[in-house]
Image: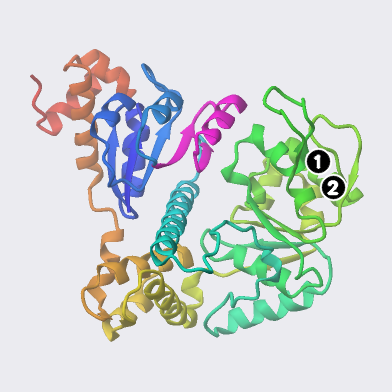
Protein backbone atom coordinates (compact mmCIF):
# COMPACT_ATOMS: atom_id res chain seq x y z
CA UNK A 1 0.00 0.00 0.00
CA UNK A 2 1.48 3.36 -1.04
CA UNK A 3 1.03 6.27 1.39
CA UNK A 4 1.81 9.97 1.00
CA UNK A 5 2.62 12.05 4.10
CA UNK A 6 2.20 15.83 3.87
CA UNK A 7 3.64 17.41 7.03
CA UNK A 8 5.61 20.66 7.44
CA UNK A 9 7.02 19.77 10.87
CA UNK A 10 10.21 17.88 10.07
CA UNK A 11 10.36 16.03 13.39
CA UNK A 12 6.80 14.78 13.01
CA UNK A 13 7.41 13.89 9.35
CA UNK A 14 10.51 11.86 10.12
CA UNK A 15 8.81 10.17 13.07
CA UNK A 16 5.90 9.12 10.85
CA UNK A 17 8.27 7.84 8.18
CA UNK A 18 10.12 5.70 10.73
CA UNK A 19 6.94 4.42 12.41
CA UNK A 20 5.05 3.58 9.20
CA UNK A 21 7.73 2.38 6.79
CA UNK A 22 7.50 -1.26 7.86
CA UNK A 23 3.74 -1.29 7.20
CA UNK A 24 3.52 0.85 4.07
CA UNK A 25 5.40 2.18 1.06
CA UNK A 26 5.99 5.79 2.20
CA UNK A 27 6.62 9.00 0.26
CA UNK A 28 6.71 12.23 2.28
CA UNK A 29 6.38 15.88 1.28
CA UNK A 30 7.51 18.99 3.18
CA UNK A 31 4.44 21.03 2.28
CA UNK A 32 1.21 20.88 0.24
CA UNK A 33 2.66 22.84 -2.69
CA UNK A 34 5.43 20.26 -3.17
CA UNK A 35 2.89 17.44 -2.83
CA UNK A 36 0.57 18.90 -5.48
CA UNK A 37 3.47 18.94 -7.97
CA UNK A 38 4.54 15.35 -7.37
CA UNK A 39 1.44 13.35 -6.40
CA UNK A 40 0.32 10.72 -8.86
CA UNK A 41 -2.51 8.18 -8.97
CA UNK A 42 -0.40 5.40 -7.42
CA UNK A 43 -1.06 6.59 -3.85
CA UNK A 44 -3.73 4.72 -1.90
CA UNK A 45 -4.03 7.09 1.07
CA UNK A 46 -2.75 10.59 1.86
CA UNK A 47 -1.99 11.55 5.45
CA UNK A 48 -1.92 15.33 5.83
CA UNK A 49 -1.62 17.91 8.58
CA UNK A 50 -4.21 20.71 8.72
CA UNK A 51 -2.25 23.69 10.06
CA UNK A 52 0.55 24.42 7.58
CA UNK A 53 1.98 27.71 6.27
CA UNK A 54 1.23 29.06 2.77
CA UNK A 55 -1.51 26.45 2.21
CA UNK A 56 -3.40 24.63 4.96
CA UNK A 57 -4.67 21.06 4.79
CA UNK A 58 -8.23 22.03 3.83
CA UNK A 59 -7.02 24.09 0.86
CA UNK A 60 -4.69 21.27 -0.10
CA UNK A 61 -7.49 18.67 -0.10
CA UNK A 62 -9.67 21.01 -2.17
CA UNK A 63 -6.82 21.50 -4.66
CA UNK A 64 -6.17 17.81 -5.24
CA UNK A 65 -7.93 16.64 -8.40
CA UNK A 66 -7.59 12.86 -8.05
CA UNK A 67 -10.11 11.26 -5.59
CA UNK A 68 -7.60 10.07 -2.98
CA UNK A 69 -8.56 8.80 0.46
CA UNK A 70 -7.39 11.28 3.10
CA UNK A 71 -6.56 10.90 6.79
CA UNK A 72 -6.12 14.22 8.57
CA UNK A 73 -3.85 14.79 11.59
CA UNK A 74 -3.69 18.03 13.53
CA UNK A 75 -2.42 19.49 16.77
CA UNK A 76 -5.15 22.12 16.96
CA UNK A 77 -8.49 20.47 16.22
CA UNK A 78 -11.48 22.76 15.80
CA UNK A 79 -15.02 21.69 15.12
CA UNK A 80 -15.24 23.78 11.96
CA UNK A 81 -12.03 22.30 10.54
CA UNK A 82 -13.14 18.76 11.41
CA UNK A 83 -16.59 19.23 9.87
CA UNK A 84 -15.13 20.87 6.75
CA UNK A 85 -12.63 18.04 6.26
CA UNK A 86 -15.34 15.41 6.67
CA UNK A 87 -17.50 17.24 4.12
CA UNK A 88 -14.58 16.98 1.69
CA UNK A 89 -14.57 13.21 2.08
CA UNK A 90 -11.78 12.81 4.65
CA UNK A 91 -11.97 9.29 6.07
CA UNK A 92 -10.55 10.03 9.54
CA UNK A 93 -9.57 13.01 11.70
CA UNK A 94 -6.86 12.40 14.34
CA UNK A 95 -5.51 14.86 16.90
CA UNK A 96 -1.92 15.01 18.12
CA UNK A 97 -0.55 13.41 20.19
CA UNK A 98 -1.79 9.99 19.07
CA UNK A 99 -0.74 6.35 19.24
CA UNK A 100 0.82 5.16 15.98
CA UNK A 101 -1.53 2.14 16.05
CA UNK A 102 -4.45 4.58 15.80
CA UNK A 103 -3.00 6.13 12.64
CA UNK A 104 -2.17 2.72 11.11
CA UNK A 105 -5.75 1.58 11.72
CA UNK A 106 -7.13 4.80 10.20
CA UNK A 107 -4.96 4.37 7.09
CA UNK A 108 -6.03 0.75 6.64
CA UNK A 109 -9.70 1.66 7.13
CA UNK A 110 -9.37 4.41 4.52
CA UNK A 111 -7.82 1.93 2.11
CA UNK A 112 -10.65 -0.54 2.76
CA UNK A 113 -13.19 2.15 1.86
CA UNK A 114 -11.32 2.62 -1.40
CA UNK A 115 -11.45 -1.12 -2.09
CA UNK A 116 -15.19 -1.21 -1.44
CA UNK A 117 -15.69 1.75 -3.78
CA UNK A 118 -13.68 0.01 -6.51
CA UNK A 119 -15.65 -3.21 -6.04
CA UNK A 120 -18.95 -1.35 -6.34
CA UNK A 121 -17.70 0.41 -9.48
CA UNK A 122 -16.61 -2.94 -10.97
CA UNK A 123 -20.00 -4.47 -10.25
CA UNK A 124 -21.79 -1.52 -11.83
CA UNK A 125 -19.64 -1.73 -14.96
CA UNK A 126 -20.14 -5.49 -15.16
CA UNK A 127 -23.92 -5.16 -14.93
CA UNK A 128 -23.90 -2.49 -17.60
CA UNK A 129 -21.88 -4.70 -19.93
CA UNK A 130 -24.00 -7.75 -19.34
CA UNK A 131 -27.19 -5.76 -19.82
CA UNK A 132 -29.22 -8.39 -18.02
CA UNK A 133 -32.95 -7.84 -17.77
CA UNK A 134 -32.85 -8.46 -14.04
CA UNK A 135 -30.22 -5.80 -13.48
CA UNK A 136 -30.16 -4.88 -9.82
CA UNK A 137 -29.43 -1.46 -8.43
CA UNK A 138 -26.07 -1.48 -6.66
CA UNK A 139 -26.43 0.28 -3.35
CA UNK A 140 -24.71 0.49 -0.01
CA UNK A 141 -26.83 -1.05 2.70
CA UNK A 142 -26.24 -0.65 6.39
CA UNK A 143 -26.65 -4.10 7.87
CA UNK A 144 -27.55 -4.84 11.46
CA UNK A 145 -24.30 -6.31 12.61
CA UNK A 146 -25.94 -8.09 15.51
CA UNK A 147 -27.70 -10.58 13.25
CA UNK A 148 -24.42 -11.39 11.45
CA UNK A 149 -23.46 -14.82 12.80
CA UNK A 150 -20.09 -15.22 11.05
CA UNK A 151 -17.42 -17.18 12.85
CA UNK A 152 -15.22 -14.81 14.82
CA UNK A 153 -12.46 -17.07 16.13
CA UNK A 154 -10.20 -19.76 14.72
CA UNK A 155 -7.94 -22.11 16.61
CA UNK A 156 -8.41 -23.95 19.87
CA UNK A 157 -5.94 -22.77 22.44
CA UNK A 158 -6.87 -23.53 26.07
CA UNK A 159 -6.75 -19.80 26.87
CA UNK A 160 -9.20 -18.97 24.07
CA UNK A 161 -11.60 -21.73 25.14
CA UNK A 162 -11.49 -20.49 28.72
CA UNK A 163 -12.20 -16.88 27.69
CA UNK A 164 -15.08 -17.79 25.37
CA UNK A 165 -16.59 -19.99 28.07
CA UNK A 166 -16.58 -17.07 30.54
CA UNK A 167 -17.97 -14.68 27.94
CA UNK A 168 -20.81 -17.03 27.05
CA UNK A 169 -21.91 -17.10 30.68
CA UNK A 170 -21.64 -13.33 30.96
CA UNK A 171 -23.42 -12.74 27.63
CA UNK A 172 -26.74 -13.93 29.01
CA UNK A 173 -26.81 -10.94 31.37
CA UNK A 174 -26.54 -7.19 30.87
CA UNK A 175 -23.56 -6.94 33.25
CA UNK A 176 -20.86 -4.48 32.16
CA UNK A 177 -17.80 -6.23 30.73
CA UNK A 178 -14.34 -4.66 30.54
CA UNK A 179 -11.99 -6.29 28.01
CA UNK A 180 -8.32 -5.81 28.85
CA UNK A 181 -5.47 -6.53 26.47
CA UNK A 182 -2.77 -5.18 24.19
CA UNK A 183 -3.52 -3.43 20.92
CA UNK A 184 -4.37 -5.85 18.11
CA UNK A 185 -5.45 -8.84 20.24
CA UNK A 186 -8.97 -8.72 18.78
CA UNK A 187 -10.94 -7.03 21.56
CA UNK A 188 -13.68 -5.92 19.15
CA UNK A 189 -14.13 -9.54 18.00
CA UNK A 190 -14.65 -10.58 21.62
CA UNK A 191 -17.18 -7.76 22.04
CA UNK A 192 -19.05 -9.02 18.95
CA UNK A 193 -18.98 -12.53 20.40
CA UNK A 194 -20.64 -11.24 23.59
CA UNK A 195 -23.30 -9.49 21.51
CA UNK A 196 -23.95 -12.52 19.29
CA UNK A 197 -24.47 -14.74 22.32
CA UNK A 198 -26.72 -12.28 24.17
CA UNK A 199 -30.49 -11.76 24.03
CA UNK A 200 -29.70 -8.63 21.98
CA UNK A 201 -28.10 -10.58 19.09
CA UNK A 202 -30.81 -9.55 16.60
CA UNK A 203 -30.28 -5.85 17.34
CA UNK A 204 -27.52 -3.51 16.25
CA UNK A 205 -23.90 -3.74 17.39
CA UNK A 206 -21.97 -0.47 17.19
CA UNK A 207 -18.38 0.39 18.08
CA UNK A 208 -16.40 3.57 18.68
CA UNK A 209 -12.70 4.10 19.36
CA UNK A 210 -12.27 6.81 21.99
CA UNK A 211 -8.69 7.51 20.93
CA UNK A 212 -9.59 8.08 17.27
CA UNK A 213 -12.00 11.02 17.71
CA UNK A 214 -11.06 14.54 18.85
CA UNK A 215 -12.33 15.43 22.32
CA UNK A 216 -14.48 18.30 21.06
CA UNK A 217 -16.28 15.96 18.65
CA UNK A 218 -16.58 12.92 20.89
CA UNK A 219 -19.47 14.21 22.99
CA UNK A 220 -21.72 14.93 20.00
CA UNK A 221 -20.71 11.58 18.44
CA UNK A 222 -21.84 9.72 21.56
CA UNK A 223 -24.80 11.79 22.71
CA UNK A 224 -25.94 13.46 19.49
CA UNK A 225 -26.97 17.09 19.29
CA UNK A 226 -29.98 19.34 18.77
CA UNK A 227 -30.37 21.67 15.82
CA UNK A 228 -28.61 24.95 16.60
CA UNK A 229 -26.50 23.49 19.42
CA UNK A 230 -23.42 24.95 17.68
CA UNK A 231 -22.58 26.73 14.44
CA UNK A 232 -22.55 23.69 12.16
CA UNK A 233 -25.52 21.93 13.79
CA UNK A 234 -28.00 22.56 10.98
CA UNK A 235 -30.17 19.59 11.94
CA UNK A 236 -30.78 17.34 14.94
CA UNK A 237 -28.58 14.26 14.98
CA UNK A 238 -28.80 11.08 17.04
CA UNK A 239 -25.65 9.94 18.79
CA UNK A 240 -24.34 6.40 19.13
CA UNK A 241 -26.21 5.76 22.37
CA UNK A 242 -29.54 6.42 20.66
CA UNK A 243 -28.54 4.70 17.42
CA UNK A 244 -27.62 1.49 19.25
CA UNK A 245 -30.80 1.49 21.37
CA UNK A 246 -31.86 -2.08 22.09
CA UNK A 247 -28.47 -3.40 21.05
CA UNK A 248 -24.85 -3.17 22.15
CA UNK A 249 -22.39 -0.29 22.13
CA UNK A 250 -18.68 -1.14 22.28
CA UNK A 251 -16.49 1.62 23.74
CA UNK A 252 -12.94 0.81 22.65
CA UNK A 253 -9.94 2.45 24.34
CA UNK A 254 -12.15 3.65 27.20
CA UNK A 255 -9.00 4.69 29.07
CA UNK A 256 -8.62 7.59 26.62
CA UNK A 257 -12.06 9.03 27.37
CA UNK A 258 -11.83 12.67 28.58
CA UNK A 259 -12.69 13.21 32.27
CA UNK A 260 -15.63 15.51 31.50
CA UNK A 261 -17.26 12.81 29.37
CA UNK A 262 -16.53 10.14 31.97
CA UNK A 263 -18.96 11.86 34.31
CA UNK A 264 -21.64 11.83 31.60
CA UNK A 265 -21.02 8.16 30.83
CA UNK A 266 -21.38 7.34 34.53
CA UNK A 267 -24.78 9.03 34.50
CA UNK A 268 -25.79 6.99 31.44
CA UNK A 269 -24.90 3.78 33.27
CA UNK A 270 -26.74 4.85 36.41
CA UNK A 271 -29.85 6.50 34.98
CA UNK A 272 -30.11 4.75 31.60
CA UNK A 273 -30.77 8.05 29.87
CA UNK A 274 -28.87 10.61 27.80
CA UNK A 275 -29.29 14.27 26.91
CA UNK A 276 -28.22 15.49 23.49
CA UNK A 277 -25.73 18.35 23.20
CA UNK A 278 -27.80 21.55 23.30
CA UNK A 279 -30.84 19.63 24.59
CA UNK A 280 -32.66 19.74 27.92
CA UNK A 281 -34.99 16.72 27.70
CA UNK A 282 -33.53 13.39 28.91
CA UNK A 283 -34.00 10.47 26.51
CA UNK A 284 -34.36 6.95 27.91
CA UNK A 285 -32.12 4.33 26.31
CA UNK A 286 -31.67 0.57 26.58
CA UNK A 287 -28.10 -0.22 25.55
CA UNK A 288 -25.64 -2.84 26.71
CA UNK A 289 -22.19 -1.27 27.25
CA UNK A 290 -19.02 -3.25 26.60
CA UNK A 291 -15.72 -1.41 27.03
CA UNK A 292 -12.09 -2.22 26.33
CA UNK A 293 -8.66 -0.76 26.90
CA UNK A 294 -4.97 -1.51 26.47
CA UNK A 295 -4.07 1.06 29.14
CA UNK A 296 -3.31 0.51 32.82
CA UNK A 297 -6.59 1.86 34.15
CA UNK A 298 -5.54 1.59 37.82
CA UNK A 299 -2.54 3.81 37.07
CA UNK A 300 -4.85 6.23 35.23
CA UNK A 301 -6.99 6.36 38.38
CA UNK A 302 -3.93 7.08 40.56
CA UNK A 303 -2.86 9.81 38.12
CA UNK A 304 -6.33 11.40 38.20
CA UNK A 305 -7.01 10.59 34.54
CA UNK A 306 -9.85 8.13 35.11
CA UNK A 307 -12.76 8.13 37.57
CA UNK A 308 -12.66 5.34 40.10
CA UNK A 309 -16.47 5.18 40.37
CA UNK A 310 -16.77 4.77 36.59
CA UNK A 311 -14.12 2.04 36.62
CA UNK A 312 -16.13 -0.04 39.09
CA UNK A 313 -19.28 0.48 37.00
CA UNK A 314 -17.55 -0.77 33.86
CA UNK A 315 -15.54 -3.48 35.58
CA UNK A 316 -18.32 -5.78 36.77
CA UNK A 317 -16.77 -8.60 34.75
CA UNK A 318 -13.14 -7.95 33.75
CA UNK A 319 -11.75 -10.24 31.03
CA UNK A 320 -8.01 -10.26 30.26
CA UNK A 321 -7.23 -11.10 26.62
CA UNK A 322 -3.70 -12.55 26.42
CA UNK A 323 -1.36 -11.54 23.56
CA UNK A 324 -1.04 -13.78 20.53
CA UNK A 325 2.40 -15.03 21.59
CA UNK A 326 0.64 -16.71 24.54
CA UNK A 327 -1.92 -18.31 22.21
CA UNK A 328 0.49 -19.98 19.77
CA UNK A 329 -2.03 -22.74 19.02
CA UNK A 330 -4.21 -20.20 17.19
CA UNK A 331 -1.57 -18.68 14.91
CA UNK A 332 -1.61 -21.21 12.08
CA UNK A 333 -5.41 -21.55 12.07
CA UNK A 334 -5.88 -17.78 11.94
CA UNK A 335 -3.25 -17.47 9.20
CA UNK A 336 -4.77 -20.22 7.07
CA UNK A 337 -8.30 -18.89 7.43
CA UNK A 338 -7.28 -15.38 6.52
CA UNK A 339 -5.23 -16.72 3.61
CA UNK A 340 -8.45 -18.26 2.25
CA UNK A 341 -10.20 -14.89 2.59
CA UNK A 342 -7.36 -13.06 0.83
CA UNK A 343 -7.39 -15.61 -2.02
CA UNK A 344 -11.11 -15.01 -2.53
CA UNK A 345 -10.70 -11.25 -2.18
CA UNK A 346 -8.03 -10.99 -4.88
CA UNK A 347 -9.24 -13.93 -6.98
CA UNK A 348 -6.03 -15.89 -6.41
CA UNK A 349 -5.82 -19.62 -6.89
CA UNK A 350 -5.82 -21.24 -3.47
CA UNK A 351 -2.52 -20.48 -1.76
CA UNK A 352 -1.09 -22.50 1.09
CA UNK A 353 1.46 -22.04 3.84
CA UNK A 354 4.72 -23.96 3.37
CA UNK A 355 6.55 -25.64 6.27
CA UNK A 356 9.16 -22.89 6.48
CA UNK A 357 6.42 -20.22 6.64
CA UNK A 358 4.55 -22.08 9.40
CA UNK A 359 7.74 -22.40 11.44
CA UNK A 360 8.51 -18.70 10.99
CA UNK A 361 4.97 -17.76 12.06
CA UNK A 362 5.29 -19.84 15.23
CA UNK A 363 8.78 -18.53 16.06
CA UNK A 364 7.82 -14.85 15.72
CA UNK A 365 6.66 -12.93 18.84
CA UNK A 366 3.88 -10.89 17.13
CA UNK A 367 4.16 -7.57 18.98
CA UNK A 368 1.25 -6.32 16.87
CA UNK A 369 -0.79 -9.44 17.71
CA UNK A 370 -3.59 -10.62 15.38
CA UNK A 371 -3.71 -7.31 13.53
CA UNK A 372 -0.05 -7.73 12.56
CA UNK A 373 -0.56 -11.39 11.62
CA UNK A 374 -3.38 -10.50 9.23
CA UNK A 375 -1.26 -7.77 7.63
CA UNK A 376 1.68 -10.14 7.15
CA UNK A 377 -0.48 -12.85 5.57
CA UNK A 378 -2.19 -10.47 3.15
CA UNK A 379 1.12 -9.05 2.00
CA UNK A 380 2.67 -12.51 1.62
CA UNK A 381 -0.27 -13.72 -0.45
CA UNK A 382 0.10 -10.76 -2.78
CA UNK A 383 3.89 -10.93 -3.13
CA UNK A 384 4.26 -14.73 -3.30
CA UNK A 385 4.81 -15.80 -6.93
CA UNK A 386 4.01 -19.47 -6.41
CA UNK A 387 1.09 -21.27 -4.82
CA UNK A 388 2.94 -22.04 -1.58
CA UNK A 389 4.02 -19.24 0.74
CA UNK A 390 7.54 -19.68 2.13
CA UNK A 391 9.36 -17.98 5.02
CA UNK A 392 10.95 -15.35 2.77
CA UNK A 393 7.51 -14.28 1.49
CA UNK A 394 6.48 -13.28 5.03
CA UNK A 395 9.24 -10.63 5.23
CA UNK A 396 9.17 -10.83 9.02
CA UNK A 397 12.78 -9.72 9.29
CA UNK A 398 11.91 -6.50 7.46
CA UNK A 399 9.52 -5.52 10.21
CA UNK A 400 12.50 -4.60 12.37
CA UNK A 401 13.91 -1.09 12.13
CA UNK A 402 16.31 -1.07 9.21
CA UNK A 403 17.98 2.28 9.76
CA UNK A 404 20.18 2.98 12.74
CA UNK A 405 19.38 5.99 14.92
CA UNK A 406 22.61 7.58 13.69
CA UNK A 407 21.63 7.33 10.02
CA UNK A 408 18.21 8.81 10.75
CA UNK A 409 19.81 11.67 12.68
CA UNK A 410 22.17 12.37 9.78
CA UNK A 411 19.24 12.45 7.35
CA UNK A 412 17.32 14.80 9.63
CA UNK A 413 20.25 17.21 10.07
CA UNK A 414 21.01 17.29 6.34
CA UNK A 415 17.40 18.10 5.47
CA UNK A 416 17.17 20.89 8.07
CA UNK A 417 20.45 22.40 6.84
CA UNK A 418 19.15 22.37 3.26
CA UNK A 419 15.82 23.92 4.27
CA UNK A 420 17.61 26.73 6.12
CA UNK A 421 20.23 27.33 3.40
CA UNK A 422 22.98 26.04 5.71
CA UNK A 423 22.41 28.77 8.28
CA UNK A 424 23.68 27.03 11.41
CA UNK A 425 21.79 29.19 13.90
CA UNK A 426 18.41 28.77 12.17
CA UNK A 427 19.05 25.04 11.65
CA UNK A 428 19.92 24.56 15.33
CA UNK A 429 16.69 26.30 16.36
CA UNK A 430 14.67 24.10 14.00
CA UNK A 431 16.27 21.02 15.57
CA UNK A 432 15.73 22.28 19.11
CA UNK A 433 19.46 22.26 19.99
CA UNK A 434 22.21 24.87 20.40
CA UNK A 435 24.50 25.98 17.58
CA UNK A 436 27.61 24.42 19.27
CA UNK A 437 25.72 21.12 19.66
CA UNK A 438 24.82 21.17 15.98
CA UNK A 439 28.43 21.87 15.00
CA UNK A 440 29.58 18.88 17.07
CA UNK A 441 27.08 16.62 15.28
CA UNK A 442 28.19 17.94 11.88
CA UNK A 443 31.79 17.11 12.80
CA UNK A 444 30.84 13.73 14.30
CA UNK A 445 28.96 12.57 11.18
CA UNK A 446 31.27 14.31 8.64
CA UNK A 447 28.33 16.20 7.17
CA UNK A 448 29.29 18.53 4.33
CA UNK A 449 28.32 22.16 4.93
CA UNK A 450 28.26 24.37 1.85
Tell me the residue at 39%/41% (across/down): 67
- Disc 2: which residue: 268
Tell me which residue sits at (75%, 70%) in the image: 201
- Residue 82 is covered by the magenta coloring: yes
Is the residue 363 above or below the residue 355 in the image?
above
For residue 99, the mark is none
Q: Is residue 254 magenta?
A: no
Q: Quick check: 156 left or right of 347? A: right
Residue 134 image-quadrant placement: bottom right
CB under 8 Å between discs 1 and 2: yes
In-front residue for pair 313/189:
189
Using a 10 Å C-alpha cutoff, classify the residue at mark 1 as few (fewer than 14 neighbours), some (14 to 19) or many (20 or more).
some
Decide: few, some or many residues near mark 2? Use Cα within 10 Å; few <14, some 14-19, many ≥20. some
Task: Name the one closer to the observer, 163 or 425.
Answer: 163
* Residue in the image at 49% along x and 45% along y: 99
Q: Quadrant of residue 158?
A: bottom right
Q: Which residue is mark 1?
A: 264
Instruction: Work out which quarter of the rendered image holds the N terminus and state it.
Output: bottom left
Q: SS of the residue at dot 2?
A: helix
Q: Position of residue 327 (x, y in %)?
A: 51, 77
- Residue range highlighted in magenta: 68-94
User: How many numbered marks have been drawn onto this rendered protein structure?
Assistant: 2
Amino acid sequence: MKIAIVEDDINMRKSLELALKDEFDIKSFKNPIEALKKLDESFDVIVTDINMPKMDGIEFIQSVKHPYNFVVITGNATLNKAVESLRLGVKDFITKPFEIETLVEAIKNAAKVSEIQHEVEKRVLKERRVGASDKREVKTERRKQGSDKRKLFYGSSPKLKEILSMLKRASATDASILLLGNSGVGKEHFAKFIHQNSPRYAKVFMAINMAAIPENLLESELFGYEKGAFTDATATKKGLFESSNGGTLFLDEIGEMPLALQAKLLRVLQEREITRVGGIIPIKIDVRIISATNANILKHIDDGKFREDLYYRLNTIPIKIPPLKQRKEEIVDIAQEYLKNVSIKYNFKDKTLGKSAIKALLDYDWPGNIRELISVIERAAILCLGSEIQEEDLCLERRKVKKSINSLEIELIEEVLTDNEYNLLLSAKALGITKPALMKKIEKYNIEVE
